[in-house]
Image (cartoon, grey):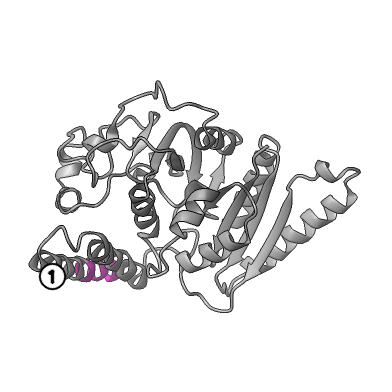
Amino acid sequence: MTTVSVVLVTYQSQDCLNACLASLRTAARACWGLEVILVDNASTDGTWSQIEAFAASEASEASEASEADSALFRTVRILRLEENRGYAFANNRGIEMASGEAVLLLNPDTEVTPEAIPVCLERLTGARGSAGASGASGASGASGSTDGESRRGTLGAVGCRLVLPDGRLDRAAKRSFPTLWNSFCKFSGLATLWPKSHLFGAYNLTWVPERASLEVDCVCGAFMMVTRDVVQQTGGFDEDYFLYGEDIDWCYRIREAGHRIWYEGSVTTLHRKGGNGGKRSAASLTHFYGTMALFFEKHYGNRYPAWVLRLVRRATRVMCAVHVALLRG
């Protein structure tokens, strides 16, 4: 049976972590062999105490188990970083500790349903075939992806349907790459005005039914399952990204390496958002808009002329300044 290493990076996560871990305990009964790796990004609240308590409790249960394979989790590993060097850096440290054939990156502000991990694992490993995918097929070809055609390689990453506490879809669950046109449509409001348009709604694939299952350009790092081969081939997250954008960047490189990205809309995970030190602030907004320019420079430097990249940098700075001003009232 394939072992899944679940990597959870925490930062000021005391208000949501226990609920996430409780959901993992339930999920472990449906997907035996989970390895849990908790990496704390130098939290100053009660997060680390919760992590230590969880690890101690699981160790106690494992030692009391009459048989080695009767423990709920295969292993629980914990790591406390001395400083916060970003979400990408911390996840990579967790990935380095992972021993599973598959790695699930999971945010502590999520709560997985029992079927989410096994179904996504079946899809990733090929036990659940891609043929006959429900909903709109070929989204990558219609979404403004870099190559315009559906890749024929193996699946390299799978994400699932993410819902917010009010039941709405977290639109980051299925996306196209942020090309100049897709970004313009999103931030100009065209995508909001015409969400069913393939032309204007490409970035968040708003014309694709949320319960469809299909190939996309990228999925959300809040629930992102990848194969060990992909980790070894692409090297994990790019640590130039401190917060935001690292999942889009990795999906881009996974596709460039010849693999496909899959959105599994048949299963769901709750995403509370903002429970991992990501509450909206001037600093988080600066990171958010900064990663947009960083992605363009890294991957579109040869696609657009230099003046376009300068325009993108200026535009993101202006949008950030306006957003921060609105935040401060």
Q: Where is residue 244 in the image (x, y as percent from the top left)?
A: 37, 61
**Looking at the picture, how far across and down is residue 208, in whole percent?**
29, 32
Q: Give the SS element for disc 1.
A: helix
- Residue sitting at 22 percent across and 40 percent down? 148
Q: Looking at the figure, which quarter contains the C terminus?
A: bottom left
Left or right: 271 in relation to 13: left
Decide which of 238, 41 is in the foreground and name it: 238
Q: Quadrant of the N terminus?
A: top right
- Find disc 1 in the rendering and name its residue: 310
The image position of residue 232, as x and y in percent, is 51, 56
Residue 153 in view here: yes
Q: What stretch is highlighted in magenta?
A: 320-329
Q: Left of 145 or right of it: where is 109?
A: right
Q: Is residue 223 above or below residue 82?
A: above
User: Which one is in front, 206 or 18?
Assistant: 206
What's the residue at 25%, 32% (across, down)? Answer: 207
| Left or right of residue 168, residue 45 in this image | right
